[in-house]
Image (cartoon, helix red, strand yellow):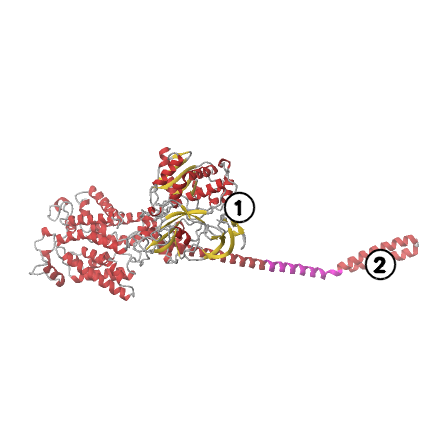
């Protein structure tokens, strides 16, 4: 069992990339001073944008809720410092297109005042139930800080039939240049171990694996020291080989446990929960300090910045101010990338704010990045397939995506592509392969939406047709009933006669009674004769 | 501050198509040198002619197709096509046959299908097959390797023969050429001689045809270097050699008197060249890992089948083209299992 625990598996493909981690790890973690203006997008996570609760002119405390989660997969947004809301509207956000999105802009007052916005601290984590942990995490707006920004409370909510036997805390930072997780582990190893205990407890004490990469010896030592060894209390530190993209959730799960997350499933399906170390630390702050997610560690690196470092940054701080804290740009600054060189998105502008997913700001010089190269035809060399960590056939995906054969790309499992960029990295024809996959994915998504819309329109049309049909039928029935009525009216004289007869009979009986009372036999006889006569006439008529 | 936006990844490796092709060319040098050593200057002249025609015809077609000419010429693929085809031709073959084969390889087999990356068949082998079907006599006029030859031609004489198609000093083709080891084997087996008798001929070396076996070794060394550099996928040459060795061992063990030993097959003719440099052309080969093993093994088996029971002794070209035709189907049935699909249940 002991040896089995420590066995590591391989995932298909992957790359050994040149490391550039040392650039940013020379100086200790610092803090970016609160900026004059904070810009907080309402959509910093996967899922639906949060719903704004404040209006221009509102005074807000640090930690105050600004926008509430809008649906199950969504996350709250909090004020990362105190001040006044000065704008709620469209502002540039970190996106390669430079697009605008809804943001809440706060003019800070410099007091960084919590007011009464801090949640009650939970000192005894053993009192935490999974549900109360989830609601605390949800209240605190915590999302995955590894870069994908998936709402954490959702990840902490396995279905009843899932048994979670392993909790993975992911400190495997496989992108070159990024060191924010490494820094966090080195500086806050004790808190991180505590967060592992909290998460373990609240998940029903699964085995916890704290995974780091083989090129993070200082982080490993810090964790060992905080834990009192390589493993203790159901928590184990695992060092995985430095192969990109072993920090990707599915690949890491494979490396640590040999399990594969089903293509259309979740880690829950194979008994796992995986949280980034930054996320785990945010959970710790939320539980033990009652703090919502207001700040995160951002690596500022590359030859385009004067003094590369790791900084603790309030969410909403403009990128330009973060860069300024790192000494500003050097003359060789060529490209601004949010994230790493393999998967990061190139930003047009540094006025955009730091968001929950901002793990790294890489200001690359010309020597660090590759300019787009002239594309050559694919020679089917198969390098892409050799390095693909999802074991896809990237060359086939490319061919079909290029020819807009969207059924075929799905047949070749396009949606299992994690966009890690390994294929494009090795492609000798310099094809921007990931670009084609994104294109195909968005195109398929668009078609799906159109199909749904047309389905809806078709259903609506069919419903209308059905309604018209039904109405026609009902009309026909009504008419039929009416006709039947008319027909029965045609035989009305009989009825009238019957009624008349009844009326006549009752009148006769009345007259009979009055005649009895008068007791005049002659009259009676005459009258009864009359009655008899009338009856006879009626009988003949009928 | 404003920055340009590009799509990720923002870094790429430094491999590119021309560098891949160049490495293949470097790896061809030892085998080519060995061939020139054993078969004379003609080998080198053929390469010069073929490469020149390849580049010229590539440029001409690209001009006609209104495509940029320069990047295609500098990607080195046409050079390789010409070079490989030249290596398959007898060293004293008239220049116009070399030119015709190369022109067909580039114009029809490559460019008419859309150029680099789009040809379903290996261009060099297509050119070779056109020649061997159309001019079987000229294509089989191989001189004996150096140590067995009675006549040696200098560079100028060789060039003269290639350009004019005439032999100097009233020599006849019969006196300067000789059946290749593969041809000899065929003919003599056809005469019901046993292998032991056939092996008495001076044409046999230690484990293949004399001279040929060493040329094969040099191709093997160049090819292993390519595999080591990961320029070619090891699965294809492993498949070719494995398939050929398996089937030849089977028949050799069944009746060693009439079935040549496996090393003979591997080290005669163009097997090493084919296994490492021709079958490995990724454009026309299978693209999946398992598919490449099957594709290679198919070539190996077909080489044996064509050599043993087919009409031509020159089996490599036909085996490669046949498996080229099968490659799309192999790809269809050998897709790798994507992560998370039908998990192995470990």
Report the front residue among A181 and A387.
Answer: A181
Quarter of the image that includes the C terminus of chain B? top left
Circle number at residue A533: 2
Discs 2, 1 touching: Cβ within 8 Å: no
Q: Are marks 2 and 1 on the same chain?
A: yes
N-terminal of the pair, mark 2 or mark 1, is 1
Q: Which residues are magenta?
A: A470-493
Relative placement, left or right, of A49 versus A228 is right
Quarter of the image that includes the N terminus of chain B? bottom left
Q: CA distance from mark 2 to mark 1?
A: 107 Å
Relative placement, left or right, of B124 versus A277 is left
Give how far across and how far down residue B70 sits, in percent.
26, 62
Relative placement, left or right, of B28 versus A296 is left
Chain letter for the residue marked with disc 1 in the picture: A
Chain letter for the residue marked with disc 2 in the picture: A
Report the front residue among B84 and A445.
Answer: A445
**Crowding near the residue tagged with mark 1, few <14, some 14–19, many ≥20 C-alpha atoms within 10 Å:** few
Q: Give the quadrant of residue B2.
A: bottom left
Q: Is residue A84 visible in this depiction of the protein?
A: yes
Mark 2: secondary structure: helix
The kind of secondary structure the magenta stretch mainly shows is helix
Give how far across and how far down residue A171 sits, in percent.
39, 43
Q: Give the quadrant of residue A335.
A: bottom left
Residue drawn at the location 27% of the way across and 66% of the way down: B63
Report the front residue among B216 and B307.
Answer: B216
Asked if residue B257 lies in the magenta stretch, the reply is no
Residue identifier under label 1: A115
């Amino acid at each position: 069992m002991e040896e089995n625990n420590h066995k590591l598996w391989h995932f298909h493909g992957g790359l050994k990339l040149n490391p550039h981690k040392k650039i940013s790890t020379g100086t200790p973690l610092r803090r970016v001073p609160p900026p004059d203006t904070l810009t907080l997008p309402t959509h910093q996570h996967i899922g639906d944008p949060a719903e704004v609760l404040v209006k221009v002119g509102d005074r807000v405390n640090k930690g105050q809720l600004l926008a509430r989660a809008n649906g199950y997969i969504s996350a709250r947004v909090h004020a990362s410092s105190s001040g006044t809301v000065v704008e709620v509207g469209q502002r540039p956000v970190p996106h390669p297109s430079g697009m605008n999105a809804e943001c809440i802009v706060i003019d800070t007052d410099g007091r960084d005042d919590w007011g009464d916005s801090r949640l009650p601290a939970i000192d005894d984590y053993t009192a935490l139930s999974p549900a109360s942990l989830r609601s605390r995490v949800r209240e605190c707006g915590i999302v995955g800080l590894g870069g994908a920004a998936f709402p954490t409370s959702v990840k902490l909510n396995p279905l009843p039939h899932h048994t979670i036997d392993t909790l993975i805390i992911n400190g495997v930072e496989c992108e070159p240049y990024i060191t924010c997780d490494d820094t966090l582990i080195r500086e806050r190893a004790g808190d991180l171990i505590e967060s592992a205990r909290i998460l373990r407890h609240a998940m029903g004490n699964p085995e916890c694996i704290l995974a780091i990469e083989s090129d993070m010896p200082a982080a490993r030592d810090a964790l060992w020291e905080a834990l009192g060894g390589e493993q203790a209390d159901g928590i184990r530190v695992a060092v995985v080989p430095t192969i990109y993209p072993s920090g990707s959730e599915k690949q890491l799960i494979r490396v640590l446990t040999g399990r594969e997350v089903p293509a259309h499933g979740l880690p829950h399906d194979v008994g796992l929960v995986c949280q980034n170390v930054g996320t785990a630390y945010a959970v710790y702050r939320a539980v033990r300090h009652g703090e919502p997610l207001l700040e995160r560690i951002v690596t500022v690196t590359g030859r385009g910045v004067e003094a590369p470092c790791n900084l603790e940054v309030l969410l909403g701080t403009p990128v330009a101010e973060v860069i300024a804290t790192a000494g500003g740009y050097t003359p060789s600054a060529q490209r601004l990338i949010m994230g790493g060189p393999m998967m990061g998105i190139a930003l047009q502008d540094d006025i955009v704010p730091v968001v929950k997913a901002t793990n790294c700001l890489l200001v690359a010089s010309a020597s660090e990045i590759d300019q787009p190269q002239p594309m050559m035809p694919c020679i089917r060399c198969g390098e892409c397939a050799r390095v693909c960590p999802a074991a896809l056939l990237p060359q086939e995906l490319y061919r079909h995506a290029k020819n807009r054969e969207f059924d075929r790309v799905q047949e070749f499992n396009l949606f299992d592509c994690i966009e890690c960029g390994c294929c494009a990295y090795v492609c000798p024809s310099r094809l921007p392969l990931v670009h084609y996959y994104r294109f195909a994915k968005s195109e398929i998504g668009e078609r799906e939406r159109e199909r749904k819309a047309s389905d809806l329109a078709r259903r609506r049309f069919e419903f209308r047709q059905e309604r018209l049909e039904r109405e026609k039928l009902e009309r026909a029935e009504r008419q039929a009933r009416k006709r039947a009525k008319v027909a029965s009216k045609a035989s009305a004289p009989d009825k009238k006669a019957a009624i008349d007869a009844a009326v006549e009979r009752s009148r006769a009986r009345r007259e009979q009674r009055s005649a009895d009372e008068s007791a005049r036999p002659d009259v009676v006889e005459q009258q009864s004769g009359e009655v008899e006569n009338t009856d006879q006439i009626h009988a003949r008529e009928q | 501050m404003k920055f340009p936006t590009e799509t990720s990844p923002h870094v790429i490796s430094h491999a590119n198509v021309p560098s891949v092709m160049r490495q293949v060319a470097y790896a061809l040098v030892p085998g080519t040198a060995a061939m020139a050593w054993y078969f004379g200057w003609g080998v080198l002249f053929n390469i010069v002619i073929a490469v020149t025609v390849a580049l010229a015809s590539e440029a001409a077609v690209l001009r006609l197709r209104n495509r940029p000419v320069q990047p295609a010429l500098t990607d080195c693929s046409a050079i390789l096509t010409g070079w490989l085809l030249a290596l398959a031709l007898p060293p004293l073959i008239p220049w116009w046959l070399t030119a015709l084969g190369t022109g067909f390889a580039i114009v029809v087999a490559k460019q008419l299908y859309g150029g680099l990356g789009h040809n379903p068949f290996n261009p060099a082998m297509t050119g070779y097959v056109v020649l061997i079907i159309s001019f079987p006599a000229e294509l089989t006029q191989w001189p004996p390797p150096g140590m067995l030859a009675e006549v040696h031609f200098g560079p100028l004489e060789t060039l003269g023969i290639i350009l004019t198609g005439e032999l100097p000093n009233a020599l006849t083709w019969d006196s300067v050429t000789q059946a290749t080891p593969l041809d000899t084997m065929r003919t003599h087996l056809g005469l019901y001689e046993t292998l032991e008798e056939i092996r008495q001929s001076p044409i046999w070396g230690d484990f293949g045809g004399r001279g040929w076996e060493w040329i094969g070794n040099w191709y093997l060394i160049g090819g292993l270097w390519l595999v080591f550099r990961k320029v070619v996928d090891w699965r294809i040459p492993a498949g070719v050699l494995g398939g050929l060795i398996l089937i030849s061992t089977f028949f050799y063990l069944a009746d060693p008197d009439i079935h040549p030993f496996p090393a003979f097959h591997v080290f005669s003719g163009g097997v090493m060249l084919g296994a490492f440099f021709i079958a490995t052309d990724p454009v026309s080969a299978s693209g999946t890992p398992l598919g490449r093993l099957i594709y290679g093994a198919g070539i190996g088996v077909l080489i044996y089948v064509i050599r043993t029971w087919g009409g031509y002794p020159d089996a490599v070209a036909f085996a490669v083209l046949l498996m080229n035709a099968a490659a799309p189907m192999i790809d269809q049935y050998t897709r790798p299992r994507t992560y998370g699909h039908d998990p192995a249940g470990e």
